[in-house]
Amino acid sequence: MRLLVIEDEVALGETVCAYLRAASHAADHVTDLASARASMAGTMYDLLLLDLGLPDGDGLTFLRALRRDGFTPPVLIATARDRISERIEGLKAGADDYLVKPFDLDEMVARIEANLSRQTILATPVRAFGDVCVHCSTKSVTVAGHTVDLTRREWGLIDRLSSRPDMTFSKSDLEDTLYGHGYEVESNAIEAHVSRLRAKLGKTAVMTVRGIGYKMGRT
């Protein structure tokens, strides 16, 4: 999944992103709301981890604006504001969950993944493409009813492609989805993942759109 961490404490933001990447999520870090807006203008994020006290504005005001504009992915607030009234205010503003600083990084990952799972299941519990079925609740794929073993990167790739089956994703889009901005990626990493997916799911499961990128196919 592709996550955006909006945190003005640089050391904390980078630590959080490193921990999320170790859990096989792509994570980007920005330190202010202007940078968050710029990142979101060009990238589809699956979840935001949002600090409230940011140098160029209040996180709750930003969150309310996002929800008014129709942004539906989960938003987790991570802040030192720990009074019950402040938590209630955050939830009313549209937050899906609340982490009080300092928080445990394992708990953070667990909460993030629980919210991502709920969001995915609510959207489409099973995505079917001929004999290939992508099961969101169990993060698994079956071909003609038989479960196929996938690595976490392979799952991340098929999850992204199947989430928007009519869309063609460029190689750089998929690199950012799997690894995040600025991550050192081998030049043939996406091609290698696609090749392995085709071997496991069928050669037409992932289609190449010449000169553009890849999209979901059918077997």
Image (spheres, grey):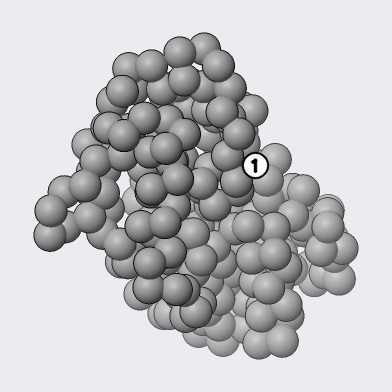
The kind of residue on which mark 1 rests is: Asn
Q: Is residue 35 above or below residue 62?
A: below
The quadrant holding residue 198 is top left
- From this viewpoint, which residue is outermost toward the front? 199
Q: Which residue is mark 1?
A: 115
Choose between 36 and 43: the one closer to the eye: 43
**Rendered location of residue 24, percent (x, y):** 63, 57
Q: Secondary structure at mark 1?
A: helix
Residue at horizontal 36%, vertical 30%?
A: 202
Residue at horizontal 16%, vertical 57%?
A: 212
Residue at horizontal 49%, vertical 69%?
A: 180
The quadrant holding residue 205 is top left
Does 42 sit left or right of 45 as displayed?
left
Does 78 sit left or right of 189 as displayed?
right
Choose between 172 and 29: the one closer to the eye: 172
Q: Is residue 102 above or below residue 66?
A: below
